[in-house]
Amino acid sequence: MRGAKRKPFRKKFFWPLVSALILASTLSGWLAATGMPSSNPFRSSGGLKFTEVVGNLGVIGQGETAEYVFHMTNESKTDIFLRGVETSCTCTTPMFSPGMLQAGESRALRVTLKGGTYRGRVWSLCFLTYSNVGSDEVLRQELSITAIVEPDIRVSRDHLVFSQDGPQTMTVRLSSGRLNVFQVLEVMTTHRAFAACASEADDFGDVTIHVKFDPGKWRNLSKSSTLRVHTTSPAEPWIEIPLSVQKT
């Protein structure tokens, strides 16, 4: 018997499929690199159900502490032993004590996040470990908590990159964030090839930091330096901005 005639492969379906697979792989890697959750599993494998697994605290200030409450319910027919909670960041503290969660019972898990000296979007992970009574298998549920940390003082640039071609001057502008009024007490750099000074505050209260680079004092063995700005911010008294030099 002769085999059926094979249909020619259609290229128009091939490249869209390849593009979709590449996009999915890239997105997954980006989520993992930024610490953002790649999935939203409301129901865990052990019968433990959460109303939500991503807690959004909105906007908080540097130095402030905010709390989020996760709610879980044991929807299985057996009791669940809650073992413990680990976190990916010291900025996150779970208020938790091990114990039994009976079938049909609900419980709240409170988690606090400290703004500290962070700036912008912050993600932290919590890992709840538990096991079903009568089973030796230890299960784990991932929870995440996020917030946007608004700084006391805003900076116009978070990194200055100079060239070895010749002397240069670059500036960084400091303006009010959570603080309506601030002062710059001192500016310094960690390498002698850089010199920094602060201007007087303008009519809006902004302060401009001028950073001068002398390539004659820069050696090829040097990798980087840091601009350090001492301010009256109680949460972030020292603002640090990396300084680097590109090879030509």
Image (cartoon, rainbow, N blue to C red):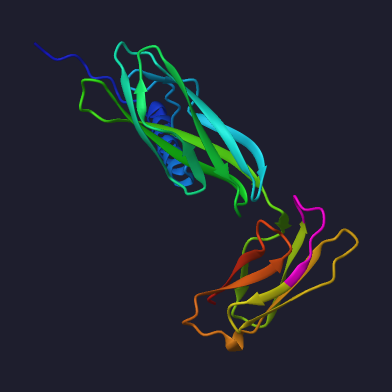
Q: Tell me residue 216's x, y (percent).
A: 60, 89
| 102 within the magenta span | no
Range covered by the magenta-colored residues: 176-185
- For the stretch drawn in magenta, the main secondary structure is loop
> Farthest residue toward the left?
1
What residue is at 49 percent from the left and 75 percent from the top?
223
In which quadrant of the rendered image does the N terminus lie?
top left
Residue 243, visible in the rendered structure = yes
Question: Please, is residue 149 above or below residue 67 in the view?
Answer: below
> Farthest residue toward the bottom?
216
* Left or right: 154 as drawn, with respect to 46: right
Q: Tell me residue 168's x, y (percent).
A: 69, 78
| 179 within the magenta span | yes
In which quadrant of the rendered image does the C terminus lie?
bottom right
Q: Nearer the viewer, residue 8 or 191?
A: 191
Q: Nearer the viewer, residue 108 or 97?
A: 97
Q: Tell me residue 11's x, y (percent).
A: 37, 29
Residue 36, visible in the rendered structure = no
Question: Please, is residue 238 above or below residue 82 in the view?
Answer: below
Q: Tell me residue 59's x, y (percent).
A: 67, 40
Q: Nearer the viewer, residue 162 or 58?
A: 58
Q: Nearer the viewer, residue 115 or 14?
A: 115
What residue is at 65 percent from the left and 50 percent from the top?
62
**Dividing the picture into quarters, in which one does residue 76 lie?**
top left
What residue is at 49 percent from the left and 82 percent from the top?
220
Question: How many numbered marks does the figure carry?
Answer: 0
What residue is at 67 percent from the left and 82 percent from the top?
167
* Left or right: 70 as drawn, with respect to 121: left
* Left or right: 209 as drawn, with respect to 45: right
